[in-house]
Amino acid sequence: MSQGPSHVFLLAGQSNMSGRGGVINDTKTNNLIWDGQVPPESTPNPNILTLDLDKTWKVAQEPLHRQLDRMKSCGIGPGMPFAHEILAKDPSFGAIGLVPCAMGGTKIAQWQKGTALYNLLVTRARTAIQSGGKLQGLLWYQGESDCGEQEYELYKARTETFFTDLRVDLNIPDLPIIMVVIASAEGNYMDAVRNAEMSIKLKNVLIVDAMGSTFIQDQKHLDTVSQIRLGQKLADKFLSSFPH
């Protein structure tokens, strides 16, 4: 394995963590494609690395989730703006390693212990730690797919179980988790899921609210401007809340 970063962050959840900023409808093919526009807040930086699927660290480039969430058109997400903001606010922070693990369209049931996504998250986290970096936190953005009538009532309990199991399996009982409170939904119960997210009281689980975001054409996925703003809010929350 190549030389790793000093600080590691897991990126997990569904499509708004994976990133759809800059994804547009190609009028020629009627397919969704990324427009290829990389804002300054998402440009490559030698101090921002990503864990490749071949288990090596490489300089991170957008779209961060293109290898993993490959059935969808990935664009700009919050991960790169998050890392840029940390380095801007604390230039002595050291190299940051981002570990993409998000998958578009997934429900919280698909992240429970023993599922393929859960196992992938734990495996990639352990791989990242083996290179010597400290696992500083999980950035979690998920819930839009749980706003239907069959899911929303179970969301809080399932999310708390997921966070607790992940901490146990990584042997980091106080792992910082910053959860994004959703601002769009597939279903009629967004407010119920938002309330569930805001009512989780586990230690070292903090929230950043995506409400007020702007979206790409589908009105479900954050556009590039809002992904940048979200990444910066996540960075500010981490720097102001946790030792580093």
Image (cartoon, rainbow, N blue to C red):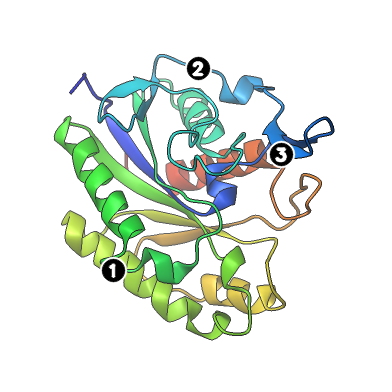
Disc nearest the viewer among 3 and 2: 3
In the rendered image, which quarter is residue 98 located in?
top left
Q: Position of residue 105 (x, y in %)?
A: 56, 58
| Front of the two marks 3 and 1 | 3
Residue annotated with mark 3: 32
Give, as a three-letter code, the residue at label 3.
Leu
Compared with 78, 41 (above or below) is above
- The residue sitting at the top extreme is 46
Q: What's the residue type where badge 1 is placed?
A: Thr
Q: Real-space Cα distance between discs 2 and 1?
A: 33 Å
Of labels 3 and 2, earlier in sequence is 3
Characterize the local packing of mark 1: few (<14), some (14-19) or many (20 or more) Cα atoms within 10 angstroms. Answer: some
The residue at the far right in this view is 27
Residue at the spot 61% in from the left edge and 25% down from the top edge: 41
Numbered mark located on residue 44 in the image: 2
Name the amino acid, label 2. Pro
